[in-house]
Amino acid sequence: MKRFIWFFALITFYSNAQENEKVDLSNPHATIYTHMYFLQNDTYLPKKAAATILGLSEEQAIKKAIKIKQVLDGKGLNIDFNKIPNNPNYKDSIGYTTFHKYVLFPQRMPKIYVEKIGENWYYSAETVASIDQIYKDVFPWYVAKLQDVIPVSGHQKYLGIELWQVIALVVLLVLVFIIFLLIKKIAFFILRKIQLQITHRTSNLELDKVLKKLAHPISLLISLSFIDKIFPSLQFPLEVNTWIFLALNIAETVFWIYVLLKLVQVIMRIYKEFTERTESRLDDQLVPILNNFLKGLVLVFGLFKVLRLFGVDTTTLVAGATIGGLAFALASQDTVKNLIGTIMIFLDKPFHIDDWIETGEISGTVEQVGFRSTIVRAADTSIYQIPNSRLSEIVINNKGLRLYRRYQTNLGVRYDTPPELIEAFVKGIREIIILHPETRSERDSYNVEFTGFGDSALLILVNVYFKSLAWGVEQSSKHRLHMAIIKLAKGLGVEFAFPSTTVTIEQFPEKQSVDLKYNISQDKIDATILKAIEDFKIDNPTENTTENL
């Protein structure tokens, strides 16, 4: 009997303690705590929880308060009361206007928040007006129907989970797998259509592999969205939902990172094909730079997203990174200058990849333009690494931007060469230049003239312009031109001079002149020039010379 009296007294005391628990609406922390505290199983007083809703009847306020808690529990949103401000005049800044409000979950549930009305804090009018629709989105119409058709045996619990929940979870996973397979095929088909519309070219095997890799995470994302939409309907406890939705959000973030990385890869591949069709070679070097930059950007934003899921204040992190970045920039001004120099090089385009440039004491072929420096390979195959800040400021002589490669040389022939052979030699060289496939053949674009008298030779100027800008092609073109000139000189009997001293010995007895005997027969000259031209044609059988004539 005494035990019964003590038990009854304890129950009465506990009930009175609950009834005497005060409703505190003085600040955001107190209001949210009041709402959640009086809807717990062991402290269930919905009338007091409904005090956090203003302007409705008690019955309506109770329904709204319960729905708010069910929505938060269904989405696995576990409230951390240590982070809720207890300042009665707390202000949340949005844009240029300041409000007395606090949003519990700004990213996932931005419409559920409390605001200050008068001297107290209540759930906002927007929250109260939209909670019914939010509840329908989280718990669709079939949830209530599902509860009606579940038999009593389906509510048997195993490890705290009801049997119908286990069966529904298995059905959900099967549906997700089927959706994943269907969406993967549809996504690949759509991606190929988009690629064909952009590039107007049929996709190759390598690009198809990339598109399939891109379609895979897209289908996973849609499958995760389906789980995110349906899983609250299974009505698991808050603890289970918290971990499940945390895992879903992390997986979704990882898949988004993967999708964006693959999207960058596809865009860079399409851009690479585009740059290969352009004349400029500098944009070819821009492909790896843009590729690394965009991938880094995706990874940084993905890292910030993951940190936010674990409750890290990324705003503070960004602010700290900004201040630290400013200090780092001040300490590494050369790196910043080089980065700016890189941007200026790509904007101004003073040279292209494979161009031959001269910058003061350095001359060579541009091989690579990086974030910090440009690599130039000299003629002796050594490497110059020039900081882009310096390269963007100094004078650059870009040989690669020439329309043609000019070549000029002086041919020295012996002083005793007859005028007829000099004239024939000049004429023959002109004909060779006209026939040469790599030289400009317009009359004002080349010069072959007897220009003067040297110390040891008569000087014949040869000035031509080669069409190709490539250094290697220019050397090959010179070789063919030189060989043709040598063959012509040999056929005519023209000899090239070298530094020498002539001593007159004709007045000595029985001494004869050493003058060479030149054949200046016009028929012989014409035949020799014709043969030299025919030989040149034979040496270049695949060249089309009609356009040069």
Image (tube, rainbow, N blue to C red):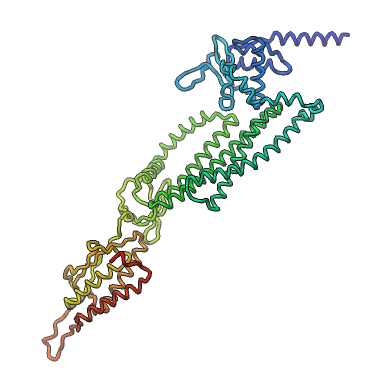
Quarter containing the C terminus:
bottom left
Position of residue 291 in the picture relative to residue 152 (left or right): left
The correct choice, above or below, for 338 with respect to 493 in the image is: above
> Residue 77 versus residue 167: which sits nearer the camera?
167
- Percent x, y of residue 385: 40, 52
Q: Is residue 307 above or below residue 359?
A: above
Foreground pick, 130 / 334: 130
In percent of the image, x 38 and y 48: which residue is there?
A: 387
Query: Can residue 229 be seen at all in this image of the molecule?
Result: yes
Q: Residue at x 67, y 16 (%)?
A: 37
Q: Is there any visible trace of residue 291 in the rendered image? A: no
Which of the 4 quarters of the picture holds residue 231? top right
Residue at the (59%, 10%) spot, across then down = 55
On the image, the x and y values in percent for residue 301 come to: 52, 36
Residue occupying the point 30% across, 71% down? 482
**Left or right: 466, with 420 as reference point:** right
- Locate the N terminus by quadrant: top right
The spot of residue 236 in percent (x, y) is 71, 27
